[in-house]
Image (cartoon, helix red, strand yellow):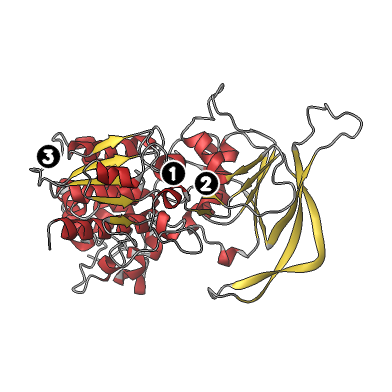
């Protein structure tokens, strides 16, 4: 049978429809499409795709089962090494990881590994009747700080080995960035909830509204009988540009804007935590978070949404799929541009004018690419005198985040780097015995799957530490 040189297309909502709702954009493969895509796998002897997966899923094995229609068997293969398959199938950048190593990709398009993984996970969630079974306890207790992808992965791997695991989550809902950062149209919150419920079935105890460093300290966790602690608290501290006007009303960090919408339901008619809707919106940045913020603003009723990014389209760090979806939905891209000032309304004749202090626009500097920086990317350089003004009612800053210093400031002996991330060794061990860390709390803002990989590495190290290996 001749192999199809191209991936099977992912069914999706039409751009003109999805731009006005929060339903998931990608509709998912049918069983027939999943089988057909799995059949494109060559089942290579050296399996390069596994090396491209941060959690080392046996990709050829699950694809071979999917070929035959054994979707539950395929799911069980994935579940051996991944605690969040339905999440990974949706938000992982497979194009730069497992699929980038696919042998099919040498001459043709690589196998749509993520698309088949998503289908298999969704099939399991829709059809499985048996709950996950908690193993016999081994007598050891581990605390996990944060319920994002690294914390959930570490908790799942340890729970499967019989550890009594407690997750402490600062917010009122588990999931970390999966629930507050990624919009519903990319990752439905019911999917995250299902993955969390599976961990509970394994015996994981989840405590919400507990801020480690404030409600409890890490030292108090040890005093309470926990023998090891994994810190997966993420990078929730937003970065700003430090330009004039960032304090005007209508300026948001992307973190705040997305959290208000994703977690606090600001899209409702009368929300408890509203955001500004409608008008003209500027989103500063070019990563996945910028795409999420821009597409969310559009769905909230913005008249026009512009992404302002200081480099060109080739350097844009967001996933190609997200960029293409944004373009299809009508997002305006202002490339090689950088704001130097946010403009606000001021009525000198009436200090009580209710419009005073609100955003009315931004001054934009045109840029060009100069010499490469330390990371090899050409550095954006201002073009002298090339400045213009853009109208705006809302400005969203999406230029990255840093780890919150609360845990570091309340725990003696924890070493951090210049960016506030915990310093760890190859096993995720910090500068203090028994305290491990991983994910964005170490690296700063990165991908879901890399955070999961860090959680998996730390779980293995914690098991070896507590079991005396």
**Residue 20: percent from the left, percent from the top?**
55, 35
Is residue 120 visible in the rendered image? The answer is no
**C-alpha span from label 2 to label 3:** 36 Å
**C-alpha span from label 2 to label 1:** 9 Å
Residue that mark 2 sits on: 292
Circles 2 and 3, Cβ within 8 Å, touching? The answer is no
Q: Earlier in the sequence, mark 2 or mark 3?
A: 3
Q: Nearer the viewer, mark 1 or mark 3?
A: 3
Which quadrant of the figure contains the C terminus?
bottom left
Q: Above or below — where is 122 with respect to 364? A: above
**Image mark for residue 186:** 1
**Residue 97: percent from the left, percent from the top?**
36, 64
Q: How many residues crowd around disc 3 within 10 Å: few (fewer than 14), some, or many (20 or more)? A: few
Q: Is residue 462 left or right of residue 242?
A: left
**Outermost top residue:** 270
**Image mark for residue 334:** none
For the residue pair 80 and 74, the one nearer the viewer reads as 80
Is residue 115 visible in the rendered image? The answer is yes
Q: Is residue 420 left or right of residue 398?
A: left
Q: Is residue 229 left or right of residue 271?
A: left
**Outermost bottom residue:** 371
Q: Residue at x 36, y 55 (%)?
A: 451
Q: Earlier in the sequence, mark 2 or mark 1?
A: 1
Circles 2 and 1, Cβ within 8 Å, touching? The answer is yes
Which quadrant of the figure contains the N terminus?
bottom left
Q: Above or below — where is 399 with respect to 265? A: below
For the residue pair 71 and 57, the one nearer the viewer reads as 57
Quadrant of the image occupied by residue 211: top left
Residue that mark 3 sits on: 133
**Element type where label 1 sits in the image:** loop
């Amino acid at each position: 049978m001749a192999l199809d040189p191209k991936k099977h297309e992912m069914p999706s909502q039409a751009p003109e429809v999805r731009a006005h709702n929060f339903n998931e954009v990608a509709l998912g493969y049918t069983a027939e499409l999943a089988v057909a895509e799995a059949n494109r796998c060559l089942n290579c002897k050296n399996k390069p795709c596994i090396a491209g997966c941060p959690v080392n899923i046996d990709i050829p094995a699950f694809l071979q089962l999917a070929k035959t229609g054994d979707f539950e068997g395929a799911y069980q293969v994935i579940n051996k090494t991944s605690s969040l398959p339905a999440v990974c199938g949706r938000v992982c950048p497979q194009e730069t990881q497992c699929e980038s190593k696919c042998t099919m990709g040498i001459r043709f398009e690589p196998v749509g590994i993520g698309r088949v993984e998503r289908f298999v996970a969704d099939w399991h969630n829709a059809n499985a009747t048996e709950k996950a079974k908690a193993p016999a306890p081994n007598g050891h207790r581990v605390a996990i700080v944060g319920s994002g992808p690294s914390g959930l992965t570490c908790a799942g791997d340890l729970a499967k080995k019989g550890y009594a695991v407690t997750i402490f989550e600062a917010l009122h809902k588990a999931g970390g960035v999966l629930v507050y950062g990624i919009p519903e149209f990319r990752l439905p919150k019911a999917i995250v909830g299902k993955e969390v419920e599976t961990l509970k079935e394994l015996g994981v105890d989840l405590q919400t509204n507990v801020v480690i460093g404030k409600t409890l300290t890490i030292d108090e966790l040890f005093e309470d009988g926990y023998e090891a602690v994994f810190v997966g608290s993420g990078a929730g501290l937003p970065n700003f540009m430090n330009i004039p006007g960032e304090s005007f009303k209508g300026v948001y960090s992307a973190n705040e804007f997305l959290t208000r919408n994703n977690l606090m339901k600001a899209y409702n008619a009368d929300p408890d935590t509203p955001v500004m809707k409608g008008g003209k919106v500027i989103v500063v940045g070019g990563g996945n978070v910028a795409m999420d913020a821009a597409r969310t603003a559009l769905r909230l009723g913005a008249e026009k949404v512009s992404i302002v990014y200081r480099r060109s389209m080739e350097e844009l760090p967001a996933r190609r799929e997200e960029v293409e979806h944004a373009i299809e939905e009508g997002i305006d891209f202002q490339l090689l541009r950088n704001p130097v000032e946010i403009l606000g309304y001021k009525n000198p004749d009436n200090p009580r004018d209710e419009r005073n202090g609100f955003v009315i626009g931004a001054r934009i500097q045109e840029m060009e690419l100069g010499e490469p920086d330390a990371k090899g990317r050409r550095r954006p350089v201002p073009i002298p005198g090339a400045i213009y003004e853009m109208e705006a009612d809302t400005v969203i800053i999406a230029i990255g985040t840093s780890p919150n210093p609360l845990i570091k400031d309340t725990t003696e002996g924890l070493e951090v780097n210049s960016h506030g991330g915990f310093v760890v060794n190859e096993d995720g061990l910090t500068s203090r015995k028994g305290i491990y860390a991983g994910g964005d709390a170490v690296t700063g803002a990165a991908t879901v799957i890399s955070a999961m990989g860090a959680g998996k590495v730390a779980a293995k190290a914690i098991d070896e530490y507590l079991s005396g290996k």
